[in-house]
Image (cartoon, rainbow, N blue to C red):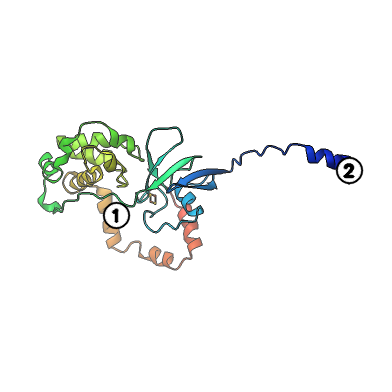
Amino acid sequence: MSATKANVKKDAKAKPAKKEPDKAMATVYIMGKAYRVPADATIMGAIEYAGYQIKRGAGCREGFCGACATVYRLPGDYKIYTGMACMTLVQDGMYLSQIPAIPAQRPVYDLSELKANVQTFQKLYPEIFRCVACNTCTKACPQELEVMDYIQAAKRGDVEKVMDLSFDCLSCGLCAIRCPAEIVHYNVGILGRRLFGRYLRKNSDHLDKRIAEVKDKKFDREYKEMMKMSKDELKKKYYARDNE
Ligand code: FES
């Protein structure tokens, strides 16, 4: 069907149709510059989509290693938000800032010379006694750990509680950059877990049994078979495994 002259004239006068915003894309600001990126991208994906190559500040890309700590702001919101760039999705209008690394105080110690008590925490991390219980560390934690509570546990010498509450820590450092008392919480958590493992852990019969089996080469035949498998065969085997 061809358009008549009159129709063409009429169409020429018609107002252009209002362009609907593209919901599949979002605008984010990276180092102050606006970029259009897929609305369902993670922050890390958006940075790469924008053309940057991430050489530092990325590791597992699965939310485990803690390398990709990020701070961001949202439009019309005074708060500074924190998150892991590989797991946090972009939002329209997000202002992003990657943190290269969190400098941290890390004393050197010989675990075999330490005792699992409050004096050890006091000697190695005396700044924990400056904690003002503001809970900022807990609010900053992307793992939703009770960070302030394990610092309080360290102040009481409750090593088991430090181990328990800090167990899923990624050591991303977001707690430490927000702390007004300048505590490096994640290193305190590591000390607690080491002290617990070395001095307070109960013996596990099934672990001892499994170690003996490994030493007796019980699994050597299976290891050899797996070493010959392709990546796809290994994947298949992995997903077909029995989950305990
Ligand atoms: S890259 Fe490992 S937690 Fe994000």
Disc 2 designates what residue?
Answer: 5
Measure the alpha-carbon separation of dots 1 and 2.
Answer: 87 Å
Q: Vertical placement of 82 versus 76: above or below?
A: below
Residue to which mark 1 is pinned? 210
Q: Identify the secondary structure beneath mark 2.
A: helix
The residue nearer to you, when weighing 217 against 230, is 230
Identity of the amino acid at label 2?
Answer: Lys
Q: Which residue is drawn at 43% across and 66% down?
A: 225
217 and 100: which is toward the camera:
100
Q: In this view, does 52 lie to the left or right of 155?
A: right
**Residue at (49, 40) in percent of width and height:** 93
The residue shown at (55%, 47%) is 38
Number of callouts: 2
Residue 146 seen anywhere in this rendered image of the structure: no
In this rendering, position of residue 181 left or right of residue 24? left
Question: Residue 62's mark?
Answer: none
**Placement of 214 over or under 64, stated as above or below:** below
Q: Looking at this view, is 90 or 80 the one in front?
A: 80
Above or below: residue 15 compared with residue 212 = above
At 12% across and 44% down in the image, what residue appears?
Answer: 120
Residue 232 visible in the picture:
yes
Say which quarter of the image contains residue 157: top left
Where is residue 112 drawn, in percent x and y?
12, 53
Q: Earlier in the sequence, mark 1 or mark 2?
A: 2
Task: Indicate left or right for 43 with 217 as reference.
Answer: right
Q: Horizontal and vertical percent for residue 230?
A: 48, 65
In this rendering, which labeled residue sits more in front, label 1 or label 2? 2
Label 1 beta carbon less than 8 Å to ligand 1: no
Q: Residues within 10 Å of mark 2 (few under 14, many from 20)?
A: few
Amino acid identity at mark 1: Arg
**Could you tell me which secondary element the residue under label 1 belongs to?**
helix
